[in-house]
C-alpha cells in the first residue's frame, strides 16, 4: 500500500512538473517574443485583410525602361529589436546591379513592434528605389499589427504592371490561408496581360523535408498551382522559410527566397535578382555576405 | 484519366476487404473558396491472417463528376496485441483542376491504454500538376514531392454496449492524408442497431496556419454512414 501510494504520488508529481514546465516555457516564449497571444485567435482574418487591401487606392507602378529592367525579390528581413538586418548589402547592390525596384515577401519585423517597424521602414526607404511589400505572419503578432502594416507598407494584396510588360501580383498568405475573396481576385489578375510574376509569404512547395512551413491546405495548393499553370504564370516567389530553393513544375517556377532573414534555416543569405530584357524574364540568386 | 482497370482493382480491393466489415458513408466537405465535395465512400476491412489487417476504400464526389476521386489501400501487421506496423497508398484526384497527388506512407500505431490510440509515421506526397499525367497512378516522381509526418491521437471517451464515441486529432484517415500544417479535430460516433448494422457519424474541422501561429478555420466535414460486420 505504501509503495503504491508512493508510485502514484511520484507519477502525479511528474505529470505536474511536466505541466508546469510546459506552461512556463509558453509564458517565457510569449515574453521573449513580445507577441500578443490574443492574436493567435483574434487577428483580422484573411477575408477582412483582403477586403481592406482591395479598398485601398491602386499601387503606383515603378518607372522603368520598358525594354530592360531589373528587380530584387526576398522575404523575411524580420528585424528584431537589435535592429540587425541584411538590407545594407542589398543597398550596395542597387546601383551597380541597376535594380529598379524591390519586392518584399512579408515578415518585415519579428514582433511587429513600433521600434522594429521604424527600423525596417527606414532601411527600405534608404534603398532609394520603389519597394513593394506583402504581409507575413510575424507582421500580425500585435493587436495593431495589421493597422500598422497598412499604414506603413500599404495593402497586403496588390497588383501592378511594370513597363507595360511584367505584371507583379503580391498576395496575402500571412495566416497560411488564401481565402475565397483573394482566390477570385487572383483569377482576375491572372487574366490581365503581361508576364505574370506572383509573390506571397507562404511557399506552396519547398523541397522534400517534412516541415510545416508550406501552405497547409492541399486543396488550396493544387487549386492555386493549376490556376497558375492554366494562366501560364511565370512563377511564384515566397518567403516564410529562411532559405533559398527553386523548383519548376507544369511550366511554373516555385521559388522560396526568405534568405535575407537574420538567421537562416539552411543555405546562404541572398536575394533573387530578376532581369527583364529581350521580352523574357530571367532570374538568378545573388548571395550576400 | 484513371483507367477502368485501376478503378476495378480498387473496387475489388475495397469489396474484397468486406470480409470483416464494410461501410458506406455519405459526407459533405466545404473548404471556403476552394472546394465543396459530397463524397460517397465505400470502404472495407478484412483480417485474412491473425495479426494482419487489410483495408481499402474508394470515394466518389457526387458534387463533382461523380467518378472516383480517391482510392486507398493499406495493410497493418500486429506483432503484439497493442502495436501495429502499417503501410499503404492513397491516390487523390481533383478532375476539375486536372491535378492529383499520389501518397505512400508507413506508420506505427499503438494502443498504450485501452481507449487511447496513437499513430506516428512518415508519408511521401507526390503532387501531379502536368496536364498529361495528373491522374497517373504510377507517377511517383515530381520536383514538388515532399515528405510529411503522419500523426493521429484518438481518445474513445464513450464506450457502452452498442454505443461508442471518440475524439481525435491528426492528419491521417483511410482516404486522406493531410499536410501536418493543418490541425484537424474529428468527433465520431457509432450506434449498433438490432438488425446487425451500425450507424456511423462523424463531424470534423480543420484549423489552418499551424506554422504561422495564427489560427483560421479551414474545412468543415460531416459524414453519415452504415457499417456491417461480417
Image: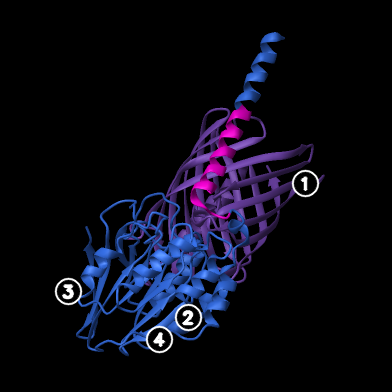
Chain colours: A blue, B purple
- In the rendered image, the vertical position of residue A58 relative to residue A197, given as above or below: below
The residue under label 3 is A96
Rendered position, A80 above or below B100: above
- Residue A184, image x, y percentages: 53, 79
Q: Position of residue B175 (x, y in %)?
A: 55, 54
The subunit letter for the residue under badge 2 reads A
Of residue B42 and residue A47, the one placed in the foreground of this image is A47
Name the residue at the top extreme. A2
> B17 or B66: nearer the eye?
B66
For label 3, count other residues whose C-alpha is less than 10 Å away and answer few (under 14), some (14-19) or many (20+). Answer: few
* Residue at 22 percent of width and 57 percent of height: A289
Residue occupied by mark 1: B191
Residue on which the image places disc 4: A60
Residue B133 locus on image (x, y percent) = 37, 67
Work out whether disc 2 and disc 3 sit on a shared chain.
Answer: yes
| Callout 3 secondary element | loop
- What subunit carries mark 4? A
Kind of element beneath mark 1: strand
Amino acid at each position: 500500500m505504501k509503495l503504491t501510494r508512493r508510485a502514484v504520488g511520484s507519477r502525479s508529481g511528474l505529470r505536474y512538473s511536466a505541466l508546469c514546465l510546459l506552461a512556463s516555457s509558453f509564458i517565457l516564449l510569449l515574453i521573449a517574443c513580445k507577441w500578443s497571444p490574443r492574436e493567435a485567435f483574434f487577428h483580422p482574418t484573411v477575408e477582412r485583410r483582403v477586403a481592406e487591401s482591395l479598398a485601398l487606392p491602386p499601387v503606383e507602378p515603378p518607372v522603368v525602361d520598358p525594354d530592360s529592367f531589373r528587380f530584387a525579390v526576398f522575404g523575411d528581413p524580420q528585424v528584431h529589436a537589435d535592429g540587425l538586418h541584411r538590407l545594407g548589402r542589398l543597398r550596395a547592390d542597387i546601383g551597380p546591379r541597376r535594380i529598379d525596384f524591390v519586392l518584399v515577401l512579408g515578415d518585415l519585423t519579428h514582433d511587429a513592434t513600433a521600434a522594429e517597424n521604424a527600423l525596417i521602414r527606414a532601411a527600405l526607404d534608404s534603398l532609394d528605389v520603389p519597394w513593394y511589400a506583402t504581409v507575413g505572419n510575424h507582421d500580425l503578432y500585435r493587436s495593431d499589427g495589421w493597422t500598422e502594416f497598412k499604414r506603413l507598407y500599404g495593402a497586403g494584396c496588390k497588383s501592378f504592371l511594370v513597363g507595360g510588360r511584367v505584371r507583379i501580383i503580391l498576395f496575402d498568405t500571412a495566416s497560411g490561408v488564401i481565402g475565397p475573396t483573394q482566390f477570385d481576385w487572383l483569377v482576375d489578375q491572372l487574366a490581365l496581360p503581361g508576364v505574370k510574376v506572383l509573390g506571397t509569404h507562404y511557399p506552396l512547395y519547398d523541397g522534400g523535408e517534412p516541415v510545416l512551413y508550406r501552405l497547409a491546405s492541399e486543396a488550396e495548393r493544387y487549386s492555386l498551382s493549376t490556376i497558375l499553370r492554366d494562366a501560364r504564370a511565370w512563377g511564384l516567389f515566397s518567403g516564410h522559410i529562411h532559405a533559398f530553393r527553386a523548383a519548376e513544375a507544369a511550366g511554373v517556377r516555385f521559388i522560396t527566397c526568405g534568405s535575407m532573414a537574420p538567421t537562416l534555416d539552411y543555405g546562404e543569405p541572398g536575394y533573387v535578382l530578376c532581369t527583364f530584357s529581350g521580352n523574357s524574364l530571367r532570374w538568378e540568386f545573388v548571395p550576400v555576405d | 484519366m484513371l483507367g477502368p482497370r485501376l478503378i476495378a482493382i480498387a473496387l475489388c480491393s475495397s469489396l474484397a476487404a468486406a470480409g470483416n466489415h464494410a461501410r458506406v458513408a455519405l459526407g459533405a466537405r466545404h473548404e471556403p473558396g476552394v472546394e465543396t465535395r459530397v463524397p460517397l465512400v465505400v470502404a472495407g476491412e478484412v483480417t485474412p491472417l491473425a495479426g494482419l489487417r487489410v483495408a481499402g476504400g474508394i470515394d466518389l464526389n457526387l458534387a463533382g463528376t461523380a467518378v472516383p476521386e480517391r482510392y486507398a489501400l493499406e495493410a497493418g501487421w500486429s506483432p503484439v496485441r497493442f502495436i501495429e506496423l502499417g503501410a499503404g497508398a492513397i491516390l487523390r484526384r481533383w478532375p476539375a483542376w486536372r491535378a492529383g497527388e499520389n501518397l505512400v506512407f508507413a506508420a506505427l500505431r499503438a494502443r498504450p491504454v485501452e481507449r487511447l490510440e496513437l499513430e506516428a509515421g512518415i508519408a511521401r506526397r507526390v503532387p501531379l500538376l502536368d496536364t498529361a499525367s495528373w491522374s497517373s497512378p504510377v507517377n511517383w516522381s515530381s520536383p514538388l514531392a515532399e515528405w510529411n509526418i503522419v500523426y493521429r491521437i484518438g481518445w474513445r471517451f464513450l464506450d457502452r454496449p452498442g454505443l461508442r464515441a471518440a475524439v481525435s486529432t491528426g492528419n491521417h484517415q483511410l482516404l486522406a492524408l493531410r499536410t501536418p500544417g493543418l490541425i484537424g479535430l474529428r468527433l465520431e460516433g457509432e450506434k449498433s442497431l438490432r438488425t446487425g448494422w451500425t450507424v456511423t457519424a462523424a463531424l470534423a474541422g480543420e484549423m489552418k496556419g499551424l506554422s504561422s501561429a495564427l489560427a483560421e478555420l479551414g474545412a468543415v466535414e460531416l459524414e453519415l454512414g452504415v457499417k456491417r460486420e461480417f
